[in-house]
Image (cartoon, rainbow, N blue to C red):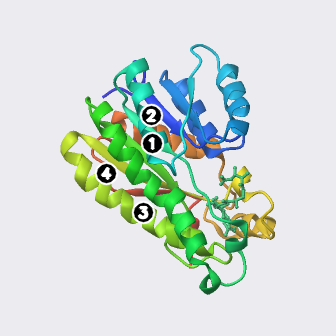
Amino acid sequence: MTFSLKGKTFVIMGIANKRSIGWGIARSLHNAGAQLIFTYNRDRMEKNVRDLAEGLEGETPLVLQCDVSNDESIQSFFHAVKEKVGVIHGIAHCVAFANREDLEGEFVDTSREGFLLAHNVSSYSLTAVAREARPLMTEGGSIITITYLGGERVVRNYNVMGVAKASLEANVKYLANDLGKDGIRVNAISAGPIRTLSAKGIRDFNSVLNEIEERAPLRRSVTAEEVGDTALFLLSDLSRGVTGENIHVDSGFHIIS
Ligand code: N5H
């Protein structure tokens, strides 16, 4: 079995800046020789993503728009990918969103609108993306998404995102069962807290990191590079027998009570 991803093409969705988990994944895959395609959502994100793509040595990744909350946008994205590269071998789905006001206080106060928004962008998008990607994954492949412990346990302030991540984690299992017959695997990585744009402005984020440094088995927080290397494993043939799984890249914090 080969570890190199030379000759293989992967889509990475959800890179915002150099701190993004998606960017950690991009570097690991790029170093393994993969051809990459990056997506951005809003126009104002395009330049950021394009600059990162152009900063990589060797072949520059394609950069295309894809709004995962819009079926037409997902369809036209994969149509463009089909025209430009034909076959793809995997996807890293690193996308989530919830209204800031739903990430504090009591979960019971979540509005219907806020609940649906979080689930739409953070969970259903994986289903829609997997469906549209399937016809392009004619050689089989691997899809990953990023989750967090708050989907398994109640974590203070994670609130509606915790419920959306629980949905995402079940989504992975049902997709793994459907797509397994096409040789497509679907897995999640449960990342420990990392100071990304999505963590920005969150009060108490320092205390969350401090708790990891004190109590996690490895006594330190994790980096986007570490998530990237586990993504490399899951997106490569090294993990060919693994599907429907959720691998915790969190310094072991999830085993601690
Ligand atoms: C327990 C915690 C801390 C509290 C909860 C944080 C949840 C963060 C996830 C969501 C996806 C963040 C989010 O949607 C923020 C937006 O309301 C505002 N931000 C934006 O619009 C920026 C500009 C864009 C780029 O962000 C997105 N998402 O599009 C969890 C932490 C300890 C761990 C953590 C930070 C988890 C996680 O899911 O990211």
Q: With 146 as the anchor, is 97 left or right in this view?
A: right
Instruction: Compare marks 3 and 4 and give the one earlier in the sequence.
Output: 3
Q: Label 4: which residue?
A: 243
**Disc 3 Cβ-to-ligand 1 distance below 8 Å:** no
Residue at point 49% right, 73% down?
A: 152
**Disc 4 Cβ-to-ligand 1 distance below 8 Å:** no
Q: Nearer the viewer, residue 101 or 54?
A: 101
CA–CA distance in space, label 4 to label 2: 28 Å
Secondary element type, mark 4 = loop
For label 1, count other residues whose C-alpha is less than 10 Å away and answer few (under 14), some (14-19) or many (20+).
Answer: few
Instruction: Compare marks 1 and 3 and give the one earlier in the sequence.
Output: 1
Say which amino acid is labelled 4.
Thr
Residue 109 lies, with reference to residue 223, above or below; the image says below
Say which amino acid is labelled 3.
Glu
Residue at point 40% right, 23% down?
A: 8
Marks 3,2: beta carbons within 8 A: no
Residue at point 49% right, 40% down?
A: 73
Instruction: Compare marks 4 and 2 and give the one earlier in the sequence.
Output: 2
Residue 196, visible in the rendered structure: no
Q: Closer to the observer: label 4 or label 1?
A: 1
For label 4, count other residues whose C-alpha is less than 10 Å away and answer few (under 14), some (14-19) or many (20+).
Answer: many
Q: Nearer the viewer, residue 110 or 54?
A: 110
Q: Label 3: which residue?
A: 169
Q: Label 1: which residue?
A: 72
For label 2, count other residues whose C-alpha is less than 10 Å away and answer few (under 14), some (14-19) or many (20+).
Answer: some
**Disc 2 Cβ-to-ligand 1 distance below 8 Å:** no
Q: Label 2: which residue?
A: 76
Q: Closer to the observer: label 3 or label 2?
A: 2
Q: Closer to the observer: label 1 or label 3?
A: 1
Which quarter shows the C terminus? bottom right
